[in-house]
Amino acid sequence: MNQRIGRAIVLIYILVGIYVAWIYDYLTPRLLRDIAEALLSIFLWFLVLLGVNLNLGR
């Protein structure tokens, strides 16, 4: 039970941090798209080597 409360507090802390970063324009749709493209290329690197374009919205 105690571990669940700790995880919930950490999750709430992270969500509030994301919200504040979004409100103050530290997180933008452009940045999120760039991060998503980077993560896709990291996890699907074999497709990149085969010539697949993983750019989102370009």
Image (cartoon, rainbow, N blue to C red):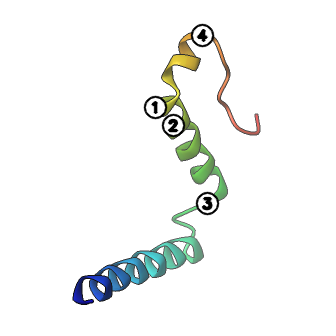
Measured as percent of width and height from the top left, residue 50 is found at 60, 10
Q: Residue at x 49, y 72 (%)?
A: 18
Of pointers 1 and 3, the one earlier in the residue sequence: 3
Nearest to the observer: residue 44 or residue 27: 44
Q: Secondary structure at mark 3?
A: loop
Q: Are marks 2 and 1 in contact (CB under 8 Å)?
A: yes
Nearest to the observer: residue 55 or residue 42: 42
Q: Nearer the viewer, mark 3 or mark 4?
A: 4
Tag 3 residue: 28
Instruction: Tell me the distance, in whole angstroms, between the alpha carbons under discs 1 and 3.
Output: 21 Å
Measured as percent of width and height from the top left, residue 32 is found at 58, 53
Tag 4 residue: 50
Q: Residue at x 54, y 75 (%)?
A: 24
Q: Amino acid at mark 1?
A: Ile
Left or right position of 47 against 11: right
Instruction: Tell me the distance, in whole angstroms, between the alpha carbons under discs 3 and 4.
Output: 30 Å
Instruction: Tell me the distance, in whole angstroms, between the alpha carbons under discs 2 and 1.
Output: 6 Å
Quadrant where the image shows the C terminus:
top right
Of pointers 2 and 4, the one earlier in the residue sequence: 2
Tag 1 residue: 42
Of pointers 2 and 3, the one earlier in the residue sequence: 3
